[in-house]
Amino acid sequence: MSKFVDLRSDTVTRPVPEMRKAIAEAEVGDDVFGDDPTVNALEARVAGEFGREAALFVPSGTMANQVALAALTQPGDEVILDRQSHIFNYEVAAASAISGIQFNALDGDRGVITTRDIAPCIREPNVHCPETRVISLENTHNRAGGRIFPLEEMISIKALADRHHLKVHLDGARIANASVATGISFAAYASCADTVSMCFSKGLGAPIGSIVVSDHETIERARKKRKMFGGGMRQVGILAAAANYSLDHHVGRLRDDHENAARLGEIISSIDGMTLLYPVETNIVVFRLDERAYTLDGFLSSLKEHRVLAVPFGPRTVRMVTHLDVGADDISYVESVLRDLKPN
Ligand SMILES: Cc1ncc(COP(=O)(O)O)c(C=O)c1O
């Protein structure tokens, strides 16, 4: 195999030729003035598919989460979330640094926090305390190995939030994976949240771009935050065209990624010295190495020598992610590499 099988993330995909053609042919205008027809069409389309009033195209998943949280809160507010969530671990404390938000991070069960976990953490009005303002969920859950957040639990959490006048944010960077795996529509998931973010640059295979959906008023606040955070973009229809192409052509095929990940999970489970940490529900496979057999660094560099890339994901833990640029033949190749790997 001459090319690398790059399983580090689903962000590594390169735009396919037809997507590049859509990029080249996109009609554009200055989006900060609201003049880019391709962005406007994408935002209207996504808002419609999520059953919400409005949407805002942004450069990254991090910015999507951050403009949403900023739009929902005031400095000094508290956001409840799962301790393993992307927002808590991998967004450089942006919500605290930029928006003055405090987190209350709960120990969920594989990324899932429930009403039973959340209810006791909602604060009563008290002059000494921050106000609980937002509950933030993640679906699918990256650190929990692509776990799908159960819809019934999301419905209960939204009802709890409504009773306490709280908002719900859904980090739906990979909500398309959840939707394809379960058959639950974007709109059904979005009905359980006030703001939802989604990424085009992960499993959907676009080079850049994410989106936030909500009501008109919240999106207008998020638009101003986007400008403040330096994310106001000009002739960005070239990227919206890629996002639009990804929605037309790359949603249904996520099924292939899930099948490839499931197969990879079975292979790993069958090899001595490797233990799958979570059931494989979508496109992420997380497993632990038996320390008597492999060191993490030795394992990853042996893989790399065989042109297979993966990332460290905690002590003795490895993550592999399937995507558009990984086919069933690549999984067979990875199987042969894993089976031949000598303990180190
Ligand atoms: C669940 C989740 N949310 C948000 C993000 C952030 O996306 P970006 O890398 O585009 O900022 C990621 C990135 O991997 C993610 O996995």
Image: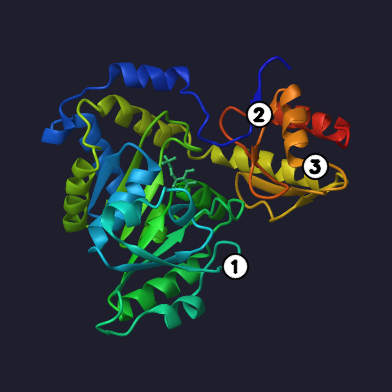
The image quarter containing residue 233 is top left
Secondary element under disc 1, as helix, strand or loop, is loop
Q: Which residue corresponds to the image point at 73% horizontal and 29% vertical from the top-left?
A: 301
Q: Taking the image as drawn, is residue 51 in sight? A: no
Mark 2 crowd level (few <14, some 14–19, many ≥20, 10 Å Cα): some
The image quarter containing residue 322 is top right
Secondary element under disc 2, as helix, strand or loop, is loop
Q: Which mark is residue 182?
A: none
In this view, the mark in front (2 or 1): 1
Q: Which residue corresponds to the image point at 54% horizontal and 36% vertical from the top-left?
A: 10
Viewer-nearest residue: 160 or 27? 160
Residue at the disc numbered 2: 327
Residue at the disc numbered 3: 267
CA separation in Å, label 3 and label 1: 25 Å
Quadrant of image for the C terminus: top right
The image quarter containing residue 259 is top right
Q: Tag 3: residue type?
A: Ile
Instruction: Compare marks 2 and 1 and give the one earlier in the sequence.
Output: 1
Q: Is residue 166 left or right of residue 20?
A: left
Relative height, residue 312 to residue 113 (above, below): above
Q: Which residue corresponds to the image point at 74% horizontal and 17% vertical from the top-left?
A: 1
Q: Is residue 154 left or right of residue 125?
A: right
Relative height, residue 312 to residue 28 (above, below): below
Q: Which mark is residue 109?
A: 1
Q: Position of residue 283 (x, y in %)?
A: 60, 44
Taking the view exactly as shown, the residue that stands out farthest to the left is 33
Mark 1 crowd level (few <14, some 14–19, many ≥20, 10 Å Cα): few
Q: Tag 2: residue type?
A: Gly
Q: Position of residue 324 (x, y in %)?
A: 56, 31
Mark 3 crowd level (few <14, some 14–19, many ≥20, 10 Å Cα): some
Q: Position of residue 298 (x, y in %)?
A: 77, 34
Instruction: Compare marks 3 and 1 and give the one earlier in the sequence.
Output: 1
